[in-house]
Structure formats: structure tokens, C-alpha cells
Amino acid sequence: MTRIFASRDVALTALLILVCLAFGLTSENFRDPMNFLDRSRHWVEIGIIAIPMTFIIATGGIDLSVGSLLALCGVVSGLAYEILGLPLPVAFGLGVVIGGVCGAINGLLSSRLRVPALVTTLATMAAFRGLAMGLSQADPIRGFPRAFTDWAGMGAFGRGDFQFPYQTAMLVALVAVGAILFSRSLIGRWSIQIGENPKAARFSTVPVHTTNLLLYTASGLCCGLAAIFYTGRFATAHPDAAKGLELEVIACVVIGGTRITGGNGSVVGTFLGVLLLGTLGFGMEMQGVVQKYQMILIGVLVVTIATFNEYIARAPRQAGAQRGTR
């Protein structure tokens, strides 16, 4: 399995390079590395949330509430700063805590009460969005200090013309941590075992309920963290923010090689999926491709790779079954 994912990561990297070369040959703006780095700020929220989503999908679960929860965390933080007068770091810390609590609710409902994760997070997707609308009276919250929006939205380090965004650097660091946890820790091993066979995992003393609770809580915390950068980038906490973000996150995870039915996964692959989708979107935008055609292409790509993932996963079992019948 490790060899399969290593080869998949190499293939995704090669595909990413080919896409970059193709767009680079046809667009002068695309060839500017600073344009590419600046664009990477737009992928950070998706990438941060895609890390715990990789673990969740590896267990055979799913979290459709992440976009709504990001909006709710942003609204809570904005109201805490604007109305309660809390210092900005405390206000956004409160937003992260709220994200963790809401994620834990998802985990409790889907694990302890055994409500399917699809149903649970579909319901909380609507509930969190409605709560964000109700708390803000459907009005965007503005008035954040310039220092915050400059840091969270446009902050970068470097010298001269080379400026590397803080947000992108944090994403890379989180991906490194996530990859180590997935491949080297018990939580990663348990996630795969649960996805392969939940009943067998219970009999082998895997703490299924606790693992699911931790993963959904981590997903909520990452939504709260992503809300900081999303709010800083737009200088606004909007209750209608991040609509459709859950689909982009899931697409990155699937393109990265994680089976939607669970049983395997790769955080590095997910990161490559984020880069590939982000690069495709950026390149097509430079070419003037209409948004709806971008979505069609991404949809076709996700379905194709999801089908390929299932084929790759089933091929060894089918080969073993054929050998057993001889």
C-alpha cells in the first residue's frame, strides 16, 4: 500500500508539473512565480481543512459541514471583537474553540449515537449556516484592524521581490505534521483500520468512538483556524462565506488518492490534490475560462480519479480471489 501511494504521489507531482508547463507556455502572468505564490493564499483554507478530512474519509466517514462551520467561526469571532470588545487574538481563539465544540458534536452524533456521518453533517451544515445567519442578522461584520488584515490576508516574509506568504508556510507545516500523524502514529493506523472494517477494528481493541470523536473535533478546530485566514483575506466575517468549500475539500482528498469509501489515505497526496486543483483554477482563470466550465472539468476529474481509486483498491483482492479458485 505504501508503494502504491508513493507511485501515486509521483504521478500527481508529474501531472502538476505538466499542468504548470502547459499554462506557463500560454500565459505570461502564470510564469511569474510571485503571481503563483500570491494565488496560493486562496488555497490555504481548503488545504488546512483537507488535512483532518483525509483522516475522516479514511475511516469511511465524511464532514459536509466544514464550509458552514468556517462561516460560523468567523461570525462568532467577529461578534466577540465588535460587540464584546474582546482583544482580536482572544476573539479568534474563541472562534477556534467554537469550531472544536461543533466538530465534537458531529463526532458524538455520528459515533456515539450512530447517526450516519453523511446525515449528521448534512444536518449540521444547515444548522451551522443558520446559526451564523441568525447571530449576525445576515449582515457581514467588518471593521477589523488593518494590522490583522495585512497579516492574515497579505502577510509574507522574504526580501526584495521574493515574498513567501505566511499562510502558505503555515499550510506546509500543518501538512508535514498531518503526514507524520497519518503514516507514523496510532491515530493514522486506527483511521485506516476503521475504514477497512469497523467491526474488526472494534474486536482488535481500536477505540473507534474515541477516534471518530477526535477526528471530527480536529476538523472543527481546523475550520476555526481557517476562518482566521479567510476573514483576514476578505477583511470581513460573512455568514454566507465559504459556500461550496466542503466540495472542494473532498475533491482534493479524493484526487490525492484517498478512497471515498475509506480504508486508505495520504495527507501528502491530499496536499498535491490541493496544489493541482488550485493550479488548474488559476491557469484556467488566466486563460479566461468561465467559472462554470472550471467546475465541470473539476467534477469530471474527481469522478475519474474516484473510479480509479476504487479500481486500484479492488484489483489486489480480485487477483487474490482468482488465485484462490484455481
Image (tube, rainbow, N blue to C red):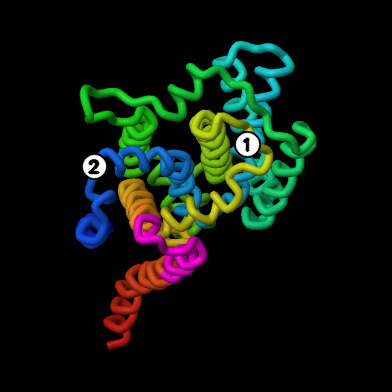
Magenta: main secondary structure:
helix
Q: Quadrant of the C terminus?
A: bottom left
Which residues fall within the magenta stretch? 284-300
Q: In the displayed structure, does residue 268 sit left or right of residue 105?
A: left
Which numbered disc, 1 or 2, marks the residue closer to the eye? 2
Question: Where's residue 248, x and y in %?
Answer: 49, 54
Amino acid tagged 1? Ala
Look at 57% across and 36% down and name the residue there. Answer: 220
Question: Where's residue 145, x and y in %?
Answer: 55, 17
Task: Please tell me whether residue 23 is drawn above or below residue 94 in the rendered image.
Answer: below
Question: Where's residue 22, x and y in %?
Answer: 23, 62
Camera-side residue of 54 and 40: 40
Residue with the mark numbered 1 = 104
- The image's mark for residue 120 is none
Task: Please tell me whether residue 81 is drawn above or below residue 116 in the rendered image.
Answer: above
- The image's mark for residue 33 is 2
Q: Seen from this angle, which residue lies furthest bottom?
A: 326
Nearer the N terminus, badge 1 or badge 2? 2
What element does badge 1 sit on? helix
Camera-side residue of 22 and 195: 22
Camera-side residue of 166 and 66: 166
The CA span between labels 1 and 2 is 40 Å
Question: Where's residue 168, x and y in %?
Answer: 35, 34
Amino acid tagged 2? Pro
- The reply to whether the magenta stretch includes residue 288 is yes
Asked whether residue 256 appears in the rendered view, the answer is no
Q: Quadrant of the N terminus?
A: bottom left
